Amino acid sequence: MAESTVVRRQAPPWTVPLVAAVAAVAVYLIGVAVGVDPEARIGSRLQAVSVPAVLIITLAAGFVGWGVRVLLGRVVRGGGETVWLVLCGLVFLGSLLGAATGTTAGAVALLVALHLVVAVIVALGLRRAA
């Protein structure tokens, strides 16, 4: 019987923000398809959340995250994986303040789902990208 070895190759780090953006747009479109009106209150005005906004913010967060991950890998002894994951958790918790500004319960749920999906993909996708 032949023995098979599975070799897992990690995707390049630059793909992580792209995957996060595609996933975020998919979550957004599902939310809109089920009738959620994605709006957030910014001060005294309402701000519609759109596909371009989701793409731009997700890509920016992902690429900034990649830069921070590389920096942590160089500065923190042992590669900084634990520091990275703790930092991601803190940033995610902080981002929920923005998600809480949704104008309806459905909008808040959609924004929380968007933030969660992006946070998980970026945190886990870049954890070994140092």
Image (cartoon, rainbow, N blue to C red):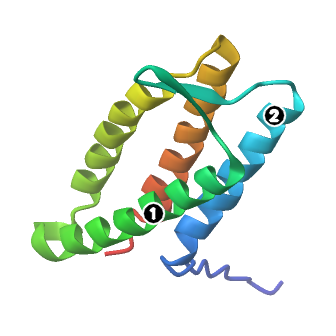
User: What residue appears at the point 48 percent right and 57 percent down from the top-left corner?
Assistant: 122
* Occupied quadrant, residue 117: top right
| Residue 66, percent from left and from top | 37, 69
Q: Label 1: state its secondary structure.
A: helix
User: What residue appears at the point 54 percent right and 66 percent down from the top-left corner?
Assistant: 17
**Cα–Cα span, label 2 and label 1:** 23 Å
Residue annotated with mark 1: 60
Q: Work out whether residue 97 or residue 120 is closer to the camera in this orientation and state it.
A: 97
Mark 2 and mark 1 lie on one chain; the one further toward the N terminus is 2
| Residue at the limit of the structure toward the right, as seen here | 33
Q: Work out whether residue 92 or residue 42 is closer to the camera in this orientation and state it.
A: 42
| Residue 65, percent from left and from top | 36, 62
Residue annotated with mark 2: 32
Q: Label 2: state its secondary structure.
A: helix
Q: Work out whether residue 52 or residue 93 is closer to the camera in this orientation and state it.
A: 52
User: What residue appears at the point 27 percent right and 66 percent down from the top-left corner?
Assistant: 68
The kind of residue on which mark 1 rests is Ala
58 to 71, vertically: above or below: above
The kind of residue on which mark 2 rests is Val
Name the disc covering residue 75, or none: none
69 to 4, vertically: above or below: above
Q: Work out whether residue 60 or residue 37 is closer to the camera in this orientation and state it.
A: 37
| Residue at the limit of the structure toward the front, as seen here | 45
If the image is split into quadrants, where does the C terminus sit? Answer: bottom left
User: What residue appears at the point 28 percent right and 60 percent down from the top-left corner?
Assistant: 81
Whether residue 127 sits left or right of residue 121 in the image: it is left
